[in-house]
Structure formats: C-alpha cells, structure tokens
Amino acid sequence: MSEKHEKLIDKKGIRLDGRKADELRPLKLQVGVLSHADGSAYIEHGKNKILAAAFGPREMHPKHLSLPDRMVLRCRYHMAPFSVQERKSPAPSRREIELSKVIKECLEPALFLELYPRTGVDVFVEVLQADGGTRCASITAAALAIADAGVPMRDLVVACAAGKVDDTVVLDLYDAEDKLGAADLPVAYMPNLNAVTLLQMDGNLTTEEFEKALNMAMDGCKKIYEMQKEALKTKYMVVKEEAEE
Amino acid sequence: MPVFFEKKQLVTPGELLAEGDYLAGENTYVEQNKIYASRIGLVDTDNKKVNVVALRAFYVPKMGDIIIGSVVEVGFNGWTVDIKSPYTALLRASDVLSRPFKPQNDELSAVLNAGDLIVAKIASYDRAHDPQLTVGEPGLGKITRGQILHVTPTKIPRIIGRKGSMISMIKQETNCQIILGLNGVILVTGKNLEEEDLAIKAIKKIEEESHTTGLTDRITQLLKESKVKVEENKNE
C-alpha cells in the first residue's frame, strides 16, 4: 500500500490539506446543544463532527455498580454507521470499547469523584462524521459537556494529537496522515494544572521526535483550551448581551 | 497575595482565582496554595473568601433545607421521594402519621401515593446514607394546588434577592403564594391562572438572566406591564 503513495508533505512543507506542520484544523465548538441532556457539547474539528452529552450525577443503575466511597464515571464512545466511508456496524467494536475506556480514564482526574459517593455520571459521545483524531475531539467535547452539566471540575480536559508524517513532526493529523503516516501521538491535557491525563502512541518516534511531538501537541491543546473556555462562556454571554441592551 | 479576577467576572472550571492569603469558598478548590474555580459561574469576594456563584449546578442535600419532592414509590414503612438531587430521599411513615405505625392497620398509599408532591424538610443526611425527610412542621406536607417549576438550585438565592426583596416583590405584584424549594423546585399558588403564569414568567426570566446587571428593574417592568394587560383583559 505504502510503496507508491503520494508525498504527504510537499517541498515547501505544506501538507495535503494545505496546512503547515504546526497548524490545527479549523475548529468550531458549541455548548448546550441538547435540551434533554444535563449538559452537552458539539465539536467540529476539521471534518470531524461529534456530539457529546453528559447526565448526572444521578443514582447509579444498575445499583450494584455504584461505589460506597466515590462517584462513578461511565463513558460511551460510539460511531454512527454513516460516520465513515464504508458503513460501520452500529454494534460497539473492539476499538470503540477501548476508546470508551480511554476517554473515561482521561476525564476522571478532572472530576472530584470523592465528593459524591454512590452516584454516577454518564457521558455519551456520538461521532457523526469521522476524519482522524476523533478520540481527541471526543475528549474535548466530553469535558465541555460535563462542565455544562454543572459537575465540579479541577480543569477542563483538552486533547490534541501530534505525529510523524514523511519524516516531519506535524500537529493534528487527519485521516490520510493517520493511516499513511509513521506515528500518531494523542495527548489529553489539563492546561491550568499542567497535567497530562492521556498519552498514547502508535508507530515509532526517536526520543527527540517524541519530545518535539509532545510539546507540539501540548501547544495545540492550549490553543484549543482557549476556544473551549470561550464556547462555555458564550452560552451565557449571549443571554447577557440580549438582556442588557 | 494577588487576585486574578474582576468582580462578577464569568469564570470557567480550572481558572486561577487567587493566590496566598485567601479562603476557598463555594465552587472553588485549593491546589498548592492557589484557588481555582471548579464550576462555571461569577466570582466574588466576601472579606477574604473567594466564592463562585455557579450558573449551573445540582442540589446536594443539607440538613434543615426546605425542599419540594415527588413521591416515586410507596414502601413498607415509608415513601421514596425524588428530590431532584443525586440522592433519593426517604420519608418514614411514623413521621407522617404522628402515631406508631402498624402495617396491619395503615394503608400508606391512602396518605401519600406515587406522584404526589410534598413540601418537606431534610431531617438528616450524610455521605454514607440517603437523606431522610420530615413533614412534621407547619407549612410542610402534601401539595394540593398550584403550579410547579424547576430552576437550577444555585439560582434560588437570586430569586429570593437581597433580604428577600425580589421574591416579596413578585408575591406582592402577582398576589401569589410562592414556596421556594432549595432543591430548585418552586411552587406557585395563586387565585387564578393568569397570576400564576405571570409569577412563573418572572421567575423563569430571573433564572435565565441571573448573571446580568439591572435585573431587578427589568423584572419590575415585566410585572407592571403584564399586570396592566391582565387588567385590560378583565375589563373587556
């Protein structure tokens, strides 16, 4: 497959979709899009379109899953059958189960689990359209949905990937780069606490490349974080401006 | 010991609020001597205490709170009550009957049935046990008439206003009785539907615009304008 694919980066260092190596895809974030969920968020990250909904804290069902000393966070990451080129079976795949677990574990450090024992928070992430980097976009949206639900948080969690394509370290890989590139490094991060909550890698990177990619991903996270805060505030600022006219 | 916000500024979870000689108040937390916000809301200081008034939150039971709940289940010796909180509350039969409760003689569903609404007080609550309710005080018990509406629990103080100014104004202008459950459930009872609807409209407006300035004036205006309309309709 990779014997004769086109170059993913041209001589000027411009990628196939026209971005520079350290450039993010265009982002759009919106909070409070679903009226039946306690909190919700929608993200458009390049061609990714993802909805996240949060419920709770509420009584756990089934009850035996609740814990006597802390709250339980449950996540479901799901891709819609129409989210990819070839129809995806709606049944949860191995990959989706793994991503659900990964998203849950990277959001947990942001929550005060010990404050509300015996309860549960449910987060549902629905990928409507996928184009590489959905786990990162899902984390960003899920954190917003939880914050919108009014669950206390240490910080918002932001995620962004970096990787290696044609021997160059690049930020925010999209589908083609993810599949044909040499390495992918998704990072979830809490910028105010300077804490990394998710770090995965597939492919190979040298120590120097890894360091460069990690820093690049963290810088990308910080940029998205600003948009995340803005999105959360916008929901209330709109009302404020209308009312104070 | 600097502060990193302006008064009434909108902050998001994780935002650094103050450093050093300050106390962490509501919806904030301390990490390495720094105070951060933990919910989206408006910051304010009360002496040395940094508080965030949350724009969205859920109700956590506290002993002595007056709340409004709905009965979800009739049990063997009491009722399970939904109080719009992460925890469901229990109301014991002996508390309601005010005499020893005998399962042979008393049919609990005749007193309170599933779906009934009650005004109650939190009698006890801690993190290991679900809250217990009591209705053994004047003003508490089953709700027989009026309308219910839900708001985010943190907005209840805003609806009450400074020293009760906001709520007493609504009561006066609409001639309605209003019971504010601290769990964000509100009971409005008036003489007619128009007056109830007006009170509900005003409360909803406060909830939506609680973080804006000049709210009291807008509510006064809303009440006056709508009242004129109601009067006109009556005269026709």
Image (cartoon, helix red, strand yellow):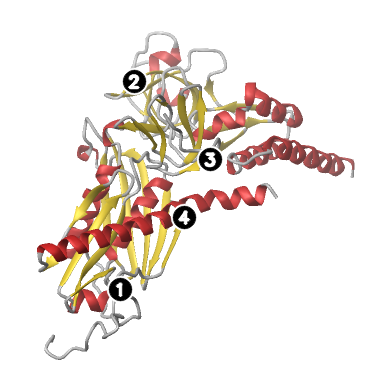
Say few, some or many: other residues with alpha carbon within 10 Å of mark 2 (under 14 / 14 to 19 / 20 or more). Answer: some
Residues tagged by mark 3 and mark 2 found on one chain of the structure? yes
- In whole angstroms, how far apart are the C-alphas of marks 3 and 2? 49 Å
Which of the labelled discs sits on residue B77, or is there none? 2
Taking A56 as reference, is A131 above or below it? below
Q: Nearer the viewer, residue A46 or B74?
A: A46
Taking B22 as reference, is B154 above or below it? below
Say few, some or many: other residues with alpha carbon within 10 Å of mark 1 (under 14 / 14 to 19 / 20 or more). Answer: some
Which of the labelled discs sits on residue A131, or is there none? 1
Amino acid type shown at disc 3:
Gln
- In whole angstroms, how far apart are the C-alphas of marks 2 and 1? 57 Å
Please give the chain letter of the residue carrying mark 4. A
Residue indicated by mark 4: A231
Label 1, secondary structure: give it: loop
Q: How many marks?
A: 4
Q: Name the residue: 20% across, 40% down.
A: A65
Q: Give x and y (percent) for residue A178.
A: 21, 74
Amino acid type shown at disc 4:
Ala
